[in-house]
Image (tube, helix red, strand yellow):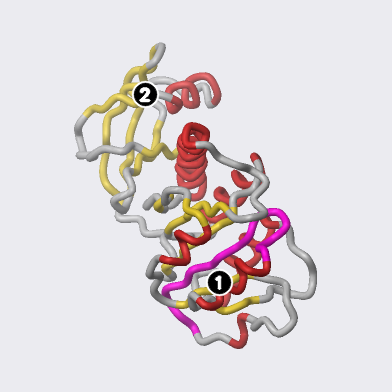
Amino acid sequence: MRVTRVFVPERLVEGTGIDLRGEAVAHLGRVLRLGPGADLMLFNGEGGEWQATIEVLERGRVGVRVGSHRPADRESPLDLTLAQGISRGERMDYTLQKAVELGVSRIVPITTQRSVMRLSAERGERRAEHWAKVVQAACEQSGRTRVPRLLPVATMDEWLAGVVPGLKLLLIRREGACRLSDLAPDPSITLLIGPEGGFAAEEASAAERAGYRALRIGPRVLRTETAAVAALSALQALWGDLG
């Protein structure tokens, strides 16, 4: 029987009681209809997970007793960064969710010339909060014990100006772009993917000047949300933990 996993952003100690609040309360009580005595699994992003039992469930509060720690490790051996051109609504949510499931270490939303979604400062904060919840929920669902870093939104120029270690790949459908089979394995990889409509020509050129290698995944056109899933899956299958 599958045990519900809940992210708790605080220190967890065996034998102590803690209160779960916010969205976890509604999810456990109204959606899953759990009650006192039900088992949970807690994790706080520091590695491993803790068994726990619901002791109190009432309006706005779930009280749980923290049990023993399990040193579970389901993280990828690859250090994967996804620099993703921001796409609209559910497309971006899907990309973040699947990237987490596929073991990405960090995600940075990128604004580009062809980004359909334009974010004001206020709207950007709201979207960042929403994306953080998507990432957290994907960790709970997928069994991950560490939460990938969600970096602040950056422009293409800001991102390319930074220092990025390891292998840098620009996913682009272009004649002459390399294939994954042409590359030597590297434990640290940054994958740069455009939004709907891809990158403008000058953006792609700027990325290559910044050290990104143009990469082509197959002969077909991939939507932005499919591109991330396909590329991360291929990298994990070749060099990571899906092989």
Q: Quadrant of residue 79?
A: bottom left
Tell me how many marks there are: 2
Q: CA distance from mark 2 to mark 1?
A: 46 Å
- What residue type is disc 2 on? Arg
Residue matched to label 1 = 206
Circle 1 Cα neighbour tier, 10 Å, few/some/many (<14 / 14–19 / ≥20): some
Q: Give coordinates of residue 233: x percent, y percent.
A: 60, 66
Q: Give coordinates of residue 129: x percent, y percent.
A: 46, 36
Q: Quadrant of the C terminus?
A: bottom right
Q: Check the image and report above or below for 171 versus 184.
A: above
Q: Secondary structure at mark 1?
A: helix
**Magenta span includes 146:** no
Q: Check the image and report above or below for 230 versus 2.
A: below
Q: Give coordinates of residue 165: x percent, y percent.
A: 39, 74
Q: Secondary structure at mark 2?
A: loop
- In the image shown, does 218 or 71 lie closer to the viewer? 218
What residue is at 53 percent from the left and 26 percent from the top? 32
Q: State the extent of the magenta-drawn residues as a range.
A: 185-200
Residue matched to label 2 = 21
Q: Quadrant of residue 76?
A: bottom left
Q: Nearer the viewer, mark 2 or mark 1?
A: 1
